[in-house]
Amino acid sequence: MIYPIVMYGDPVLRQKAKDLEQGTDLKQLTEDMFETMHAANGIGLAAPQIGKSIRLFIVDGTELDEEEEDMTDFKKVFVNPQILEETGTPWEFEEGCLSIPNIREKVSRKEQLTIRYYDENWTLHEEEYDGMKARIIQHEYDHIEGKLFVDYLPPLKKRLLKGKLADISKGKVDTEYRISAPDK
């Protein structure tokens, strides 16, 4: 099932998501999330973006053509994740978000992270990521913490985007995927 993507302005995007109960069956939900993300041409999707305030996100960078990084195995489910450490030199990269369509801005993030999480089968993992994989995880992790990439922008840049963000929250935005706008 393909869910509508929740747009900027919806309160669910600003809530700190709740942990999932250990052993919860996530098979159907994660399948639906991958289907929703792929239909919207995304590379990551957090549960709050489909209206569910739970600590779950998925990533799929297998279609990315990154010259420096092998992304062929980067399709994962992160349940109740905790970023344990972020290290390295911050680097800027232009990010976008399915919940904030048609806006892309440079965001600075640290280059490496260590994360502990469960997969969809409730197997515990502790792994290190760097580069683009770390960035994708950091972006999706922010969603379950109630943060959005626009929160990293300087005040002037945010003011310049205010009108576009207001339009997005009203559903006045062109997308190739179904949306759920809070002020529609």
Image (cartoon, rainbow, N blue to C red):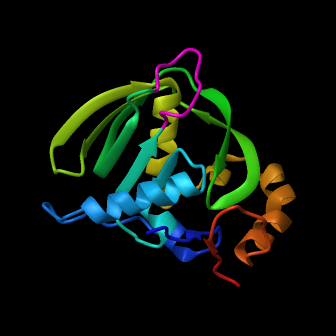
Residue occupying the point 47% across, 73% down: 51
- Magenta stretch: dominant SS? loop
Please identify the quadrant where the N terminus is shown.
bottom left
Inspect this view and state whether residue 24 appears. Answer: yes
Depth check: give the residue in front, 28 or 131: 28
Residue occupying the point 42% across, 63% down: 47
Task: Provide residue 85's location: percent of width, then percent of height.
Answer: 36, 33
Q: Is residue 31 above or below residue 5?
A: above
Q: In this view, does 27 lie to the left or right of 87?
A: left
Task: Provide residue 130's location: percent of width, then percent of height.
Answer: 45, 24
Residue occupying the point 50% across, 39% down: 136
Depth check: give the residue in front, 13 or 34: 34
Task: Provide residue 6's location: percent of width, then percent of height.
Answer: 57, 70
Q: In this view, does 23 lie to the left or right of 165?
A: left
Task: Specify start and end residues of the magenta stretch as a single range.
Answer: 61-71
Task: Provide residue 45's location: percent of width, then percent of height.
Answer: 48, 54
